[in-house]
Image: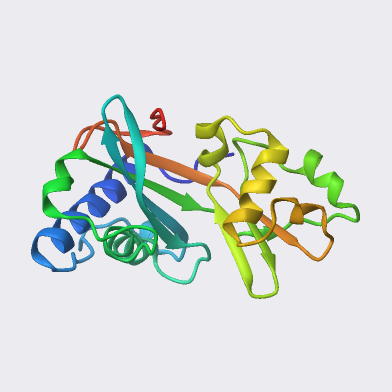
Amino acid sequence: MTHVYSDDDGKLLVELARLTVDEIVQHQRKAQPPQDAPEHLRKESGVFVTLNSIKGDSVALRGCIGRPYPTQPLIDATIDSAVDSATRDPRFTPVEPKELDAILVELSVLTPPMKIEYDDPMKLLELVEVGRDGLIASRGMWRGLLLPQVPVDWGWNVEEYLKHTCNKAGLPADAWKDSQTEFMSFQAEIFGEESPRGNVIRNPSHPRC
């Protein structure tokens, strides 16, 4: 995909997410948007903040929450997503101050999700591309999202990716074969810390536990 955001944009956003996590965990205080942020970072955009905890030579997910749709200015959505990832991910207890020095902050800026059109669910195997597409699976009130870096990190093929996205939505793994299950795709520009509070790079890669 064409890069919309520069490496400097990514550095600003990740450092803002890191500041937000530190502030909310250590002081129960919400960070404020920087007054000198570029105007294009104030446009509405979807974003996810991912926190990974270093475990020896690998990393493990510690929190990941965001806004799939462009309903907030990117700067504000980054702050809110960082707060939620550190304190409100229902899969984990809130991050504690003693953990902060072993946490990697990663940020994914999303394109607006678009419905994948097909007349046969098997065509999803051709329409979805691992490494390019993030996915949202939905059926009725059930909904689940996986970021595009997830299948890459875990080495999944397209079918495995579809199955795991269905599971994330609370649906059976084979629900992707049911025409009542709908999929949306999106792309993301990903930036993250190489080490806790370290350099911010595009498309960081960390071995998973």
Render colour scheme:
rainbow
Left/right placement of residue 87 relative to residue 179 reads left
Considering only vertical position in the picture, is 109 above or below 71? Answer: above
Left/right placement of residue 143 relative to residue 74 reads right
Q: Position of residue 173 (x, y in %)?
A: 69, 51
Q: Answer whether residue 156 is visible to the viewer in this image.
A: yes
| Residue sitting at x 44%, y 57% | 47
Q: Position of residue 198 (x, y in %)?
A: 20, 33
Left/right placement of residue 97 relative to residue 206 reads left
Residue 10 or residue 208, whichever sits in front? 208
| Residue sitting at x 50%, y 66% | 70
Q: Quadrant of the N terminus?
A: top right
Residue 85 or residue 80, whichever sits in front? 85
The quarter of the displayed image where residue 199 is located? top left
Q: Answer whether residue 112 is visible to the viewer in this image.
A: no
| Residue sitting at x 38%, y 64% | 90
| Residue sitting at x 43%, y 33% | 203
Left/right placement of residue 177 relative to residue 47 reads right
Considering only vertical position in the picture, is 73 above or below 53? Answer: below
Q: Position of residue 57 (x, y in %)?
A: 30, 24
The quarter of the displayed image where residue 182 is located? bottom right
Q: Give the residue furthest to the front.
A: 172
Q: Quadrant of the C terminus?
A: top left
Q: Position of residue 111 (x, y in %)?
A: 56, 54
